[in-house]
Amino acid sequence: MIMPLTDDIVAIIILVIVLILASVLFTQKIITSETASATSKHEAFLEDYYSTAINSFMHLTDNITHKQFNVVLGDYYLLGRYIGNPHDPALLKHQVEAALNNTLGQNNYYMNLTPVMTKSIISFVIDGSDSLSNERKILGSGMQTFISNLNQIFIIPPEIKIYILTDKPETTMCAPFPDIQSLNCKAVGFDELYSQGHFDVQPPSFGHGSYAEWEQNNPYTLNYKYFFFSADWVAGTIYATKKFIDEGYQRAGLSLNIVIPVSDKLSTNSIATECFNLEDRSDYIVCSLCNNDCSSAAARSRTYLNEDTYTFLNNHNTIVIPLQSTRCSFNYDPSWNYLQPSDYTNQYVSITKGFPVTPDLCSKPGCAGCSPGPPGEFCFHKNCEGEVTAQMNELATRTGGQLFNMEDISGDLAAQLSNIIEDAVNNYYLEFGSFDPERQRYVIERNILLPSSVTTKMSLVVYKDPYED
C-alpha cells in the first residue's frame, strides 16, 4: 500500500509544478501583451503628436516673406527658389530650421521633403547652322542611352523635345535623332520662333529702331535672316518654355521644364551687326568672315538676357543647361571661290587688311573672323568664345542650371548630361536638421499636399531622449 501512495504524491507534485509554470507563463504573456499594447499606444500617440507639430510648423509665419511655411515651400517648388531672397539658396534652410527648432527642439530632428513630379519635359534647342552638324549627330547617337538614364532619375519619365532652329526640311534636320515614341523632333522656322504669346521676342533690329524698320529699309538683306535666327538660342529657350506652358504641363502639381540650348555662337550669331546691313552678298560674306569685332554681336545677343527673361523662366519652373561647343567645325564653302570684289571688299580687305579677295580668304592671317582648325575646317569667330561662355553661364546660373562644354567630355555624353540633370532635380530635395544614425529615433512618414497643389513626401526623424526606454 505504500508504493501507490508515493506515486500519488509524486503526481500531485508534478501537477503543482505544471500549474505554477503555466501560471508564470500566462502572467508573462499578459505582461508582454500589456507592454506591447502600451508601446503601440505610445508610438501612436507620438506619431499623432509629431504630425500635429508638423502641421503647426506649416502654419507658422516666415518673418521674411510674411507667408506661412506651407505657402513658402509650395512657392519654392513651383518657382525653383526661395522668394525671400532668390539669390541666397541657404536662406530657406535657415528660416525653416529656425521654426523647426522652436517646434521640435534644436538638434532633435531631421526632416527631408521630396516633391512628387507630376510631369516634366526636357527640350533641346539646337543651333541649326552648318557648324553644328557634327554636334547634332553626337547628340542623336547618344539619345537612346540618355532617355534610359532619365528613367532612373524621374519617377514619371519626362518627354523629350528636339527643337532645331532652321528653315530647312524637318526630315533632313531631324535625321540624326532616333524615331522613338518618347522623343519628338521639330524644325522651328523664323516665323514660329518669333511668334507672339506669353512672352514676346522680336528679331534683332541691327541698329534700326525695330526689326520691321530694318526689314523695310534693307529688303535686300532678308536672305541673311537664316544666319541670325538659326543661332538665336535665347529666343529658342523662351520658345521652348512657351510650348511648355501651351501644352499644359503646369496645370496640376510640380512639373519641371529643363531647356538645353546647344550652340557654338553668340545668340543671333557672332557675326558683327554691320555685316547684316550690307547689300552685296560678297560684302556680307567677307564681312562675316573677316570682321572680328565681337562687341556689336555681344551687345545684340544680350537683348533678351535681362531680368524680364529670368523672371519669366523662373516663374515657369525652367532650368537651363546650355551646351557650348568650342570645336572648330566650320567647313570652308567652295562658293566663296566665286566672290566678286566690291566697294566694301576693296575697302575692308584690300585697304584695311592689306590683301585681296581670294579663294583662300579664310586662311589669311588678317581675316581674323575665322582661323584654321583641323584639316579642311575653320574656327568661326574664335575671339567671341569667351563671351559665349559668359552669356550661357549667366543664363544657367540665373535659372538653377549649369553650363556644359561639349569638348570637356571625358567619356559618355549621355551619362554626363544625365548627371547634370540629376543634380538639378536634386535641388528640389530639401533637408533640414541633421541625421545621426547612432541615436535612437522615431520616424514619421506622410504625404503633404501644399497650397500650390504640389504633393511632397515627408520623412521626419525625431530623436529619443537618451534616458527613454
Image (cartoon, grey):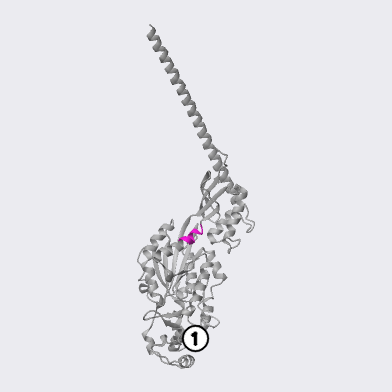
State left or right for residue 99 relative to residue 134: right
Q: Nearer the viewer, residue 407 or 428?
A: 407
Whether 243 is drawn above or below 298: the answer is above
Looking at the picture, tell me which residue is in the foreground, 420 or 44: 420
Dot 1 alpha-carbon crowd within 10 angstroms: few under 14, some 14 to 19, many 20 or more: many
Would residue 416 be found to the left or right of residue 430 on screen? left
Q: Secondary structure at mark 1?
A: helix
The image position of residue 200, as x and y in percent, is 52, 72
Q: Is residue 355 above or below residue 412?
A: below
Q: Percent x, y for residue 67?
A: 62, 56
Q: Which residues are magenta?
A: 422-428
Question: In the rendered structure, which amino acid carries the disc numbered 1?
Answer: Asn
Q: Identify the main secondary structure in magenta.
A: helix
Q: Is residue 349 left or right of residue 83?
A: left
Can residue 76 be seen? yes
Which residue extends farthest top? 1
Q: How many marks?
A: 1
Residue lying at 40% horizontally and 9% vertically, measured from the top left: 5
Q: In the picture, which quadrant includes the N terminus?
A: top left
**Residue 216 x, y percent position in the rendering:** 50, 84
Q: Which residue is mark 1?
A: 277
- Residue visible at 57% across and 70% down in the picture: 307
**Quick check: 447 above or below 396?**
above
In the picture, which quadrant includes the C terminus? top right
**Which one is in front, 440 or 149?**
440
Q: Depth check: 362 or 210 in front?
A: 362
| 426 within the magenta span | yes
Answer yes or no: is residue 252 visible. no
Question: Is residue 73 on the magenta stretch?
Answer: no
